[in-house]
Image (spheres, rainbow, N blue to C red):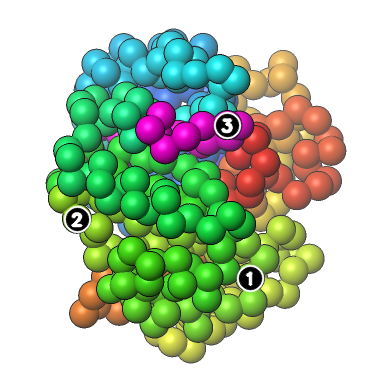
Amino acid sequence: MSLVRPHLAEVLVGRVAFDRLLALARHLPAHGLGVIETRLASRGTGSADFALRLTAPDQAADLAPRLPTSHLGTFLLSGWQDLGHPLPVASVWLEFDLDRAPRGLPEPVTCARLHGSWDAEWLVGKLLPALHGRPLKASQKRWLRRSLAELPAAASVLYAFSLAARPGNAVRLEVCGLEPAAMVAYLDRWAPAAGRQIAEIAPHVEGCDRYHLSFDVADDVSPRLGVECGFARLPHREPGWRQLLDRMVASGLCDAAKRDAALAWPGSDSLWTTAARWPPEATSLGGHCVRCLSHVKLVSTPERPPEAKAYLIFEHVRRRAQVDGEPASRLSQPASA
């Protein structure tokens, strides 16, 4: 975390928020892809949350026993490899909400990245209960089955979440392959109120390369919806990033200083450029600490203005090609994401 601090403007992540990130990082594996989530509106003082990607159970060997819920530790150590073959879960994300200073490891939101072949009953009856630590309610199953049955052929579920760490015990699906107009048409078939919400925020995210739609299901479909958007190239090669954030600044959804700080985030460091801050345990590994802007998310809640967030990725990589190319983002669709 110390490697990225000079590139992480205080307007994006304030001192209190960064101290919380540091306190959390002491309990997490030293290597892996991390994402800092930061709010873009002018209100607030640079608060932030953090997510970590795990691509194999051995990454969680030290982490799992210290998690607050035993079912999650079991799932991380072996469970996601026992859920089917060919393996439908490519990776697992742990997302830590840091609205309060962490004491040890807080219970994370858990997210499974899907790939390969699977069916609705596996997702509803096996994966989500394993993430959630309990069977889903009958109402959740009904809504989830309906949402999956209405998915167009061009769309797919890329991520499945348990939100048991938050009030309401909801689960979340994140769908890729739909542009905003198609999102509205999809939701109109089974959750028309949600479709109207997405139609209202769609003008803010026009012209992007990639989109994800996320929705939560508890007893009903939650009125809190998300649209993630971004571009395949990084900001220095893709003017669309600035155009997207400029529109949000003009609409009052993004602070101009936060826009500039988010666009300036991408880059890389090595032992030779940051010798004083390079972690001693990584000295023999070489490589680079790569930073990229993953995506922007708009969260829609009725009777409130949309909330804009930016997701800032960083990862230690050993191969030069990963530095010269475009690092993988959470919004990308390859199995490595």
Q: Residue at x 34, y 78 (%)?
A: 196
User: Is residue 332 visible in this depiction of the protein?
Assistant: yes
Residues shaded magenta? 106-123
Whichever of callouts 2 and 1 sits on the residue coming sooner in the sequence is 1
* Amino acid marked by disc 3: Ser
Look at the numbered discs 1 and 3 and tell me whether their residues touch, using CB distance below 8 Å. no
Whichever of callouts 1 and 3 sits on the residue coming sooner in the sequence is 3
Q: Residue at x 32, y 29 (%)?
A: 125
Residue 176 position within the rendered picture, expressed as x and y whole percent measured from the top left: 55, 54
> In the rendered image, which residue does mark 3 sit on?
117
> In the rendered image, which residue does mark 2 sit on?
220
User: Is residue 5 visible in this depiction of the protein?
Assistant: no
* Amino acid marked by disc 1: Cys
Whether residue 119 appears in magenta in the rendering, the answer is: yes
Residue 131 position within the rendered picture, expressed as x and y whole percent measured from the top left: 33, 29
Q: In this picture, is 297 found above or below 58? A: below
User: Which sits in the foreground, 216 or 238?
Assistant: 216
Q: CA distance from mark 2 to mark 1?
A: 30 Å
Whichever of callouts 2 and 3 sits on the residue coming sooner in the sequence is 3
